[in-house]
Image: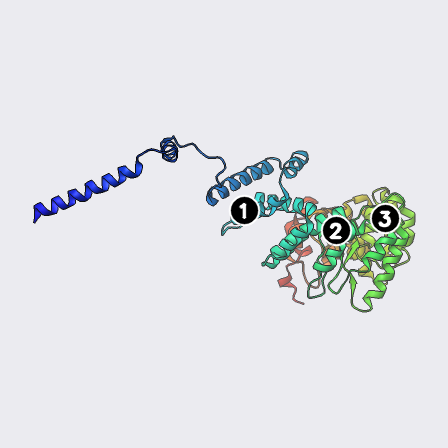
Amino acid sequence: MKIRSSITYGVVFLIGFAVAWGIRSPRGPAADAHERWVSAPTKPRTDRIPHPAAAAGTRNSRFDGLLKQLADAQYQKDKEAEVLAGIATADFLPMIERIARGAGFTGLGYREMEQLGRLLTAWSERDPEAALVWADGIENPKDRKDLLDKVIVAVSNKDCEKGLELVRRYCLTGTGRWEIPYEIQGKLVSMDAETMLRTLGTFVSSNGTSGTGGKFSEDYDFRRALDGLADLHETLTSGNQSLAVIPGNLLKEWARRDPEGARAWCMLGRTVPCNDVSEFMDGFCSNATPEQAAEALVDLTKRSPQTQVRYQNAWGVLGEQQNGETIERFIALMPGEREEKLGNLLKASTHSAGGPYDRSKALLVKQMTAEERVSVFEDCFSSGGCDANNREIFQPILRQLGHGDDEIRRMLPDPASHPE
């Protein structure tokens, strides 16, 4: 059985070999060509479609290189503009998404946020519609708001009217509050007076006013702007509404350029949010002597019928100015008994703290004689005592001026020992 099987396998092998040889021979042109092709060394083909993973790797490597160039160009506007100009419009979105994917659970760092913002701004300048659709599709509300703001600002930089259309479409919250990007607020308040009044009148809020510093032309009509804003304020406040945005430095800038014109307008007693006596005095004092500043402050504060309100308004200015001579002249020019005036001003000063106000408190205390200090301080804090914050401010000042600890304790009594 074994011999027969072996013979059978051998016959099959020989027949198969013969058939194969018969198929190969005789040789023909097609067979020779096939053999040459099979035996020829393999050469790489440049026309093959790369594997998707390899293509993605190449693209991501290119994106990483561009992002590094962008990071290196930070704070170099010309170089940054050159890098952004070299990015294809179609690459902005995948590059932004690559930054976002790399954030991980800890979120984007400062550098990544800066890069994303610059890419989105450049994309918005080239293809605002696509950038707007993408930003509007972000699910996280805060991220969506931040990204939409960048698109809206970029659009407004090229076309202010189109930017304002987007503000009206996207920046009004469900509670009636306008959340207008700061850069666009600056554009609104820097328009000429008539355009500013007409435009700001379309942004009415039920949630307060934002005062933003404007830039005004040399021939800016400050009187028209302030009169118009005062009219709008009177109309809106009757309905518990207000302008969402207002120039916060109109009166200050007018007082700097035309002190007497601005002063005469202030004396009318009209109200414009974010443009009060302190703003006027801030501009007025930039070119005024201490005597002139004190005189103007006395005139303006005398309009209030309440004594303590007058002194609080005055201290709001004197505390910021940090000028001992102005404080001295104000005390001299205000009507009333000297010790009474010192007491009113000291009491007004206790409602403010920090920075210039603390330094101005020292200047106020130095205007008093030792006897006046004891009398004024004891009277000021006789009813409710002196809170810890004011004690901390006044104690070293009084020690420096020669008052002993026992005397200071009487001048600055602990509220616990003076129950109301």
The reply to whether dot 3 and dot 1 touch (C-beta < 8 Å) is no
Q: Residue 116 carries which label?
A: none
Q: Which residue has dot 1 on it? A: 98
Q: How crowded is mark 3: few (under 14 residues within 10 Å), some or many (20 or more)?
A: many
Quarter of the figure with the C terminus: bottom right
Q: What residue type is labelled 3?
A: Ala
User: How many tags in the picture?
Assistant: 3
Q: Distance between the residues labelled 3 and 1?
A: 61 Å
Provide residue 264's location: percent of width, then percent of height.
92, 52
159 is higher (above) or lower (below) than 340: above
**Residue 371 visible here:** no
Q: Work out whether residue 409 or residue 124 is closer to the camera in this orientation and state it.
A: 124
Q: Quadrant of residue 218?
A: top right
Dot 3 falls on a residue whose secondary structure is helix
Q: Residue at x 37, y 32 (%)?
A: 32
Q: Residues within 10 Å of mark 2 (few under 14, many from 20)?
A: many
Q: Residue at x 46, y 44 (%)?
A: 53
Q: Residues within 10 Å of mark 1 (few under 14, many from 20)?
A: some
Q: Work out whether residue 42 or residue 135 is closer to the camera in this orientation and state it.
A: 42
Q: Which residue has dot 2 on it? A: 184
Q: How far apart are marks 2 and 3 (CA)?
A: 37 Å
Which label lies toward us, 2 or 3?
A: 2
Name the side, left or right, on which 274 lies relative to 78. right
Q: Work out whether residue 377 or residue 209 is closer to the camera in this orientation and state it.
A: 209
Q: Which residue has dot 3 on it? A: 294
Dot 2 falls on a residue whose secondary structure is helix
N-terminal of the two: label 3 or label 1?
1
**Residue 201 visible here:** yes
